[in-house]
Image (cartoon, rainbow, N blue to C red):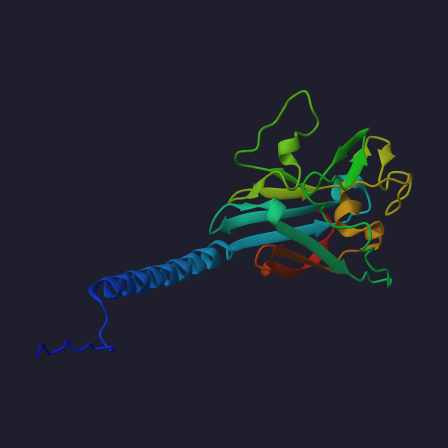
Amino acid sequence: MRKGMSKNSDAVSPVVGVMLMIVVTVVIAAVLSIYAGGMAVTTQNAPSGSFNCKISNGGTWENSAFALDVISVSESIPTKDVKLTVSWIASDGTTDNVDTKGPAEKGKENCQYDGYKYNVPLGYGPDIDRIPSELYNVSQFYGNYALVAGRTLYAMPIGASGEGYGVTQRYEYSVDSQDPMRAILGRDWNHLRVGDRVNVRLTYIPSGKVLFDKDVVVEEKI
């Protein structure tokens, strides 16, 4: 009498075993890839830098300005990814006009004068091209350049000999215009006086990290 062969239902065929090993390997590789990618994104979204800011209001366009110097950065930081905000209360109680201050986004000009539109603060320093036939080049517009060591972000009121901010009367605009200082500090910035404080902040938009936050004391001239 032929004995029947017994089956072991708990056994796993070699083919299935190999497939399981491949699946496990793929899963582990995917997890490691996601983990490594997460580390890379975190590093990319966390630049840092050292900055210095000065603000002056001497009552005329010649001695009033906003200047933010980039001392050092961990990497080149595009200004299209950086939000510049200010807030202040002048000694006479006037506050900043939040509706008309702050650099606009790339491609959206925030001030205009002399028949042209600009996005301020303008960038000066390394790797910014100048066109002699133009007052300013679009490569200087905020949002078109990057924060690199040696760069200065600069703005000043409209002015020329015999006209402009504070020429007719110190600390007063003779015409209504949206000039660079108003674009950054607000339309009532001319109420600021020496000794008043302006909070200036740079925020890296992708991560929300604050790169610079300082109460800048207004000077008479910089």
Instruction: Give x and y (percent) for residue 161.
Output: 82, 30
Question: Camera-side residue: 82 or 188?
Answer: 82
Instruction: Find residue 114 and report its image quarter.
Output: top right
Question: Which residue ends up furthest to the left in the rendered image?
Answer: 1
Question: Camera-side residue: 104 or 212?
Answer: 104
Instruction: Give x and y (percent) for residue 82.
Output: 62, 50
Q: Is residue 169 above or below residue 4?
A: above
Instruction: Find residue 128 and report its image quarter.
Output: top right
Q: Quadrant of the N terminus?
A: bottom left
Q: Is residue 80 visible?
A: yes
Q: Is residue 158 shown left or right of residue 175?
A: left
Q: Is residue 138 above or below residue 68?
A: above
Q: Residue at x 71, y 39 (%)?
A: 119
Question: Which residue ends up furthest to the front in the rendered image?
Answer: 1
Instruction: Give x and y (percent) for residue 53.
Output: 63, 52
Q: Residue at x 59, y 39 (%)?
A: 145
Q: Residue at x 63, y 61 (%)?
A: 213
Instruction: Give x and y (percent) for residue 142.
Output: 66, 41
Q: Residue at x 80, y 40 (%)?
A: 179
Q: Is residue 30 shown left or right of residue 162?
A: left
Q: Is residue 75 shown left or right of residue 115?
A: left
Q: Is residue 195 visible?
A: no
Q: How many marks?
A: 0
Q: Is residue 36 above or below residue 156?
A: below
Q: Is residue 172 above or below residue 30?
A: above
Question: Which residue ends up furthest to the top in the rendered image?
Answer: 133
